[in-house]
Image: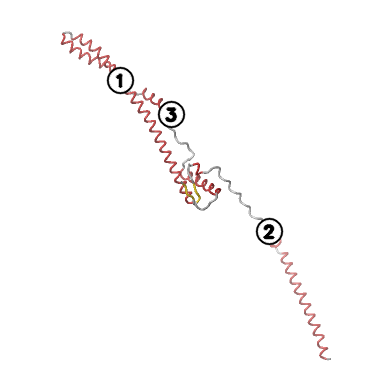
């Protein structure tokens, strides 16, 4: 009987201790929850997502085709990516070299331009003068010598002077015509030479631009021909 009396208070004590522990644990959990809810971090709104950059628009043309070249992707690049790479290389080479690949090739002079230059050169060509007088003098000397043989030097000189004048004038005209023709030919040849030099300089610039474009595209994984 004494043993039963002692067991009842012991059981009651254990029950009281168990209830107190559960209450304390519940209070601690509730306090922690309230603390977390009231913390500054919990009250701040979530950060907004970063804005998505707009897609780069496709270039309006194929730079390789514009240069008369062919580009082949070696790393399975998409067609859109190839267009962008071509455009970037096109602009990069243009900035580095200062060459305008869209400049028109120089054309040679037209026939009308060549003819006008030849006519101008012929008009400005030097002309011989005094041919008639020199011819008359030489003719007079020759005529006088012949006239002396026949006994009439004066008449011979007069005839010789007349013939010499005509011959001197004819020779002078021929010399002047030859001078004009040479001047005209020289002017036409000079125009053609200048046009050839301009075309050669243009071709050299375009070759330089294409080599730069090929090198840039090769570095990006393309074969350019």
Q: Nearer the viewer, mark 3 or mark 2?
A: 3
Could you tell me residue 92's position as x and y percent? 49, 46
- Residue 27's image quarter? bottom right
Could you tell me residue 48's position as x and y percent? 66, 55
Residue named by callout 3: 110
Upstream in sequence: badge 3 or badge 2:
2
Kindly report the distance in space between the C-alpha atoms of the residues bearing marks 3 and 2: 75 Å
Kindly report the distance in space between the C-alpha atoms of the residues bearing marks 3 and 1: 30 Å
Residue named by callout 1: 174
Instruction: In the rendered view, tell whether residue 137 sits above or below residue 32.
Output: above
Could you tell me residue 34's position as x and y percent? 74, 67
Upstream in sequence: badge 1 or badge 2:
2
Q: In which quarter of the image is the N terminus?
A: bottom right
Number of marks in the rendered image? 3
Query: Marks 3 and 1: CB-CB under 8 Å?
Result: no
In the rendered image, the residue lying farthest to the bottom is 1
Residue named by callout 2: 46
- Residue 174's image quarter? top left
């Amino acid at each position: 009987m004494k043993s039963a009396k002692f067991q009842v208070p012991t059981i009651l004590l254990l029950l009281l201790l168990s209830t107190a522990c559960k209450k304390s644990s519940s209070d601690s959990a509730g306090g922690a929850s309230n603390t977390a809810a009231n913390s500054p971090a919990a009250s701040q709104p979530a950060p907004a997502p970063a804005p998505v950059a707009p897609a780069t628009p496709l270039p309006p043309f194929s730079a390789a085709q514009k240069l008369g070249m062919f580009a082949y992707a070696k790393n399975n690049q998409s067609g859109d990516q190839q267009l962008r790479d071509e455009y970037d290389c096109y602009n990069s080479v243009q900035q580095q070299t200062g060459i305008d690949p869209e400049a028109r090739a120089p054309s040679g002079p037209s026939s009308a331009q060549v003819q006008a230059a030849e006519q101008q050169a012929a008009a400005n060509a030097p002309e011989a003068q005094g041919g008639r007088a020199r011819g008359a003098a030489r003719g007079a000397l020759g005529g006088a010598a012949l006239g002396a043989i026949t006994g009439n030097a004066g008449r011979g000189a007069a005839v010789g002077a007349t013939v010499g004048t005509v011959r001197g004038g004819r020779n002078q005209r021929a010399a002047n015509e030859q001078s004009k023709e040479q001047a005209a030919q020289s002017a036409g040849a000079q125009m053609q030479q200048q046009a050839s030099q301009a075309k050669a300089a243009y071709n050299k610039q375009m070759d330089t631009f294409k080599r730069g474009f090929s090198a840039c595209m090769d570095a990006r994984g393309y074969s350019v021909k």
